[in-house]
Amino acid sequence: MRAGDCLGEMGAAPINGDWPPHLHFQIIIDPLGLDTDFPGVAAPALRAVMRSLSPDPNLLLRLPPACFPAMGRTKAATLRERQQRIGYNLSISYRQPLKIVRGLGVYLYDDAGRPYLDCVNNVAHVGHCHPHVVEAGQRQMAVLNTNTRYLHDSMIEYAERLTATLPPQLSVCFFVNSGSEANDLALRLARAATGAFDMITLDVAYHGHTQALIEVSPYKHDGPGGRGRPPFVQKVMMPDPYRGPYYGYSSASGRAYAAHVQTALDAIHAQGRGVAGFIAESLMGCGGQLVFPDDFLFEAFEVVRAAGGICIADEVQTGFGRVGTHYWGFETQSAIPDIVTMGKPAGNGHPLAAVVTTPEVARKFANGMEYFNTFGGNPVSCAIGMAVLDVIEQEQLQANALDVGDYLMARLRELMSVQPIIGDVRGLGLYIGVELVLDRETQAPAGEHASYIANRMRELGVLISTDGPFHNVLKIKPPIVFSRANADHLVDNLALVLGEDAVQVG
Ligand SMILES: Cc1ncc(COP(=O)(O)O)c(C=O)c1O
């Protein structure tokens, strides 16, 4: 064959295996007897062997580099640059960092095209890059995006739809851009409404990264680099039905933990001050994916209100149907907060968060100082927020979270029956924790084993992470489009890793 000779002609889709017409030019040194069945693509792991059989065709074609898409930085270069140019205390997941370049549904894809089952990203609530959400953002972005000092229907419609999911007294919204902004504002509302400053929080809680939130986040102020609890914050023991002094999920246990909230109130009163409020997640994330014993929040809220305080439910991780039985986590505790904060899943990855409160609290906050937020509640964010609500409703994702969550927990409990390292499996819907112990009697935490398992799972293409004060809880909170087949894939791989020598206990 000479330069200029015709190699072939482009066929229409039907004679091209229904692929859109394209040129596939591949050199095959040894067809291995496969003839036309020789693979045209291969998994990243087979790259070296494929290259030895099918060398770069541009050795022959000699097309100029401009004909090829830019490859971007190598993973190593991205890591190096990040270590220099990005704040030094922003950690990277996994011993072998991942360079993720695409997401779709429950999958993330790395720079080599390898898919990873995402079992931990509770931000991509209705699935990564859900087309309805993407389209809503794109459409509104092409029309208008501006601040909220003009009238616009999208903010009103979103407020109406969001408050329709909440108890009727929670009817006034503030739109912000992150969970931290939402909780920071919630503290301001509580302090303005009561004229008091002291707050009560749960041990090991995390509520955000601003100064005011570090103060109510023992996970941060008691951790590395922290300065401990400030005098105006009281910390209450985590209601941990597995490890705490009151075992189990009974209402008696819930009330026993809530009694410690009264002790915190007494400590504030003893210093001659009043309480501004109590902030708690409805299920605890950093505490180790904890489900509270029955009525804990209900009782704690009663006690705080009796002392004149405001009750804040942080639903940044737990809201929007994830817990399956209810739309909001606090509903599982029969509790009604005065303020509810939401974030992560609200915009499915777009920075959208909200504070919803009662007209009474909102009126007291409106004390003359204007509240303005440049980006909060803009038309693009609201369009995206409404698209997320559409998908939850249309795809019945709350029911899916319940069905798949129950199925997944049942399978994890089966695994627990043969794996002594699993001390506890707990959760509601698709908010699940698997607590690992060296010994079920002593409950000695197996933190190093948990880290090993998360890293091995990543090698197998399944993303989970760890949490809890001893870093020994496997945290599972996938996009709530997660299916039973996804759950099987997760548990089958976990079973494989738990069979490895490095994680044998007892
Ligand atoms: C329970 C809880 N509240 C608040 C926040 C802060 O949200 P953001 O990171 O969006 O500021 C987080 C973040 O992890 C969280 O888990």
Image: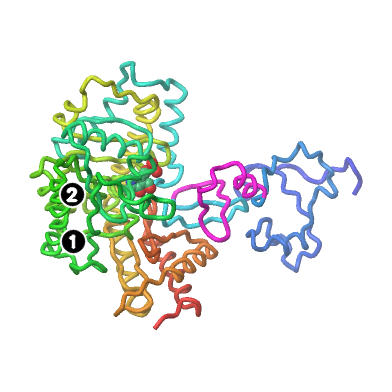
Q: Quadrant of residue 158?
A: top left
Is 366 left or right of 303, judged from the image as shown? Answer: right
Q: Secondary structure at mark 2?
A: helix
Q: Provide the residue designation for mark 1.
A: 293
Residue type, label 2: Glu
What residue do we see at 28% from left, 45% from top? 315
Give 72 or 267, whichever is nearer the viewer.
267
Q: Which mark is residue 331?
A: 2
Is 1 left or right of 274, judged from the image as shown? Answer: right
Region rendered in magenta: 77-105
Residue type, label 1: Pro
Q: Secondary structure at mark 1?
A: loop
Q: Percent position (x, y) of residue 226?
A: 40, 51
Q: Percent position (x, y) of residue 361?
A: 17, 31
Q: Percent position (x, y) of residue 388?
A: 35, 39
In the rendered view, would you say 217 is above or below 48? Answer: above
Which image quarter is the C terminus in? bottom left
Q: Residue furthest bottom?
A: 506
Q: Percent position (x, y) of residue 209?
A: 39, 43
Give 307 or 9, whichever is nearer the viewer.
307
Q: Quadrant of residue 151?
A: top left
Is 285 left or right of 73, judged from the image as shown? Answer: left
Give 181 or 402, whichever is nearer the viewer.
181
Measure how far apart labels 2 and 1 are at the Cα level. 13 Å
Q: How many marks?
A: 2
Q: Residue furthest right?
A: 2
Is 464 left or right of 412, judged from the image as shown? Answer: right
